[in-house]
Amino acid sequence: MTAERSTADILDAAVHVREVARSATTGATGVDTVLAALSEVMEYDHASLVRWDPLRRRHATLAGNYPDDATAYIETRLHHDPVFAVLRSPARGGLWLRDVPWQLLAASPGFQEVLSPLGIEDGVAQCLFAADGRYVGMLNVSTRRPRRAPDPARAVVTLLTESLAVAVDPRAGRPPEARAAVDPATDARRPGGLSPRELQVLAELTTGRTNREIAERLHITPRTVGTHIEHILAKLDLPNRAAAAARAAGWGIEISP
């Protein structure tokens, strides 16, 4: 793609990204094809689409071409980076590198240890959220060349976030009846017949917290937490809390990072 491409060309490329993202959701194509299509919207040297794993409390790369050390940082450390706290707000759009205050960059291990050594001068990091508000993953795009201004790709990338979120969301391809089965809003549809409080405790189990830590967060006693866990295991016919956490992650029941 050249700098002379018109806004209309970029919008046409964005439509193609949306189509490819839908195909990735149905399994017709891989997530790597989404990144390939995105390169027609904006040039990049490195890019990745990652999924948030609520059970392991880390990101998992679905497609990308960052070096191994950068990929490892994105997967295991990025959600602890000071920049991530800014990114994580559902109200904001993508965070472009040139817009990050220098004080924040100075405090960011991701920039100091990963992006700067790669010679990255521009790019965008965009948190992705499902329609129900769940944090499902991230888009990371980096370039060694500053982008021109004004840059129509900025607005286009923001418009693509819904489609990109669907592409990385493990629940997006499930049939309607499966999605309804994990809807805690209605008693009849609560998974395993769990009570609202049991669902809260089940969600906490995905974080690896102890009974005492869960009790402090839910303002109940550790003994009550233990009782809820016993009931959860009995109702779901599971052997231990690790199995319960895995079941919760599979249902999409989670605590956001």
Image (cartoon, grey):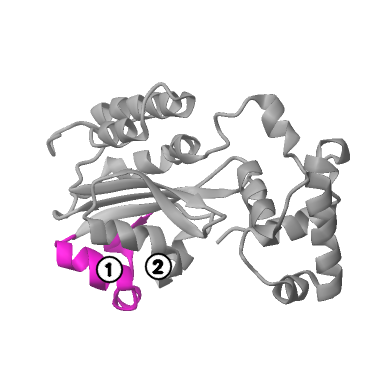
Residue drawn at x 73%, y 32% is 180
Callout 1 amino acid: Phe
Mark 2 touches mark 1? (CB < 8 Å): yes
**Residue 168 rendering spot, x and y as whole percentages:** 46, 40
Residue at the spot of label 1: 111
Quadrant in which residue 97 is drawn: bottom left
Residue 123 in the image, given as x and y percentages of width and height: 26, 53
Amino acid tagged 2: Val
What separation in Å lies between label 2 and label 1 (alpha carbons)?
Answer: 9 Å
Choose top left, top right, bottom left or bottom right for residue 33.
top left
Q: Residue visible at 73% across and 56% down?
A: 202
Highlighted magenta segment, given as a residue range:
94-120
Identified at 33% across, 25% down, the residue is 16
Residue 218 on the magenta segment: no
| Element carrying mark 1 | helix
- Mark 2, Cα crowd under 10 Å, few <14 / some 14-19 / many 20+, is many
Q: Nearer the viewer, residue 191 or 152?
A: 191
- Name the N-terminal-most of marks 2 and 1: 2
Q: Left or right? Give the position of 195 relative to 250.
A: right
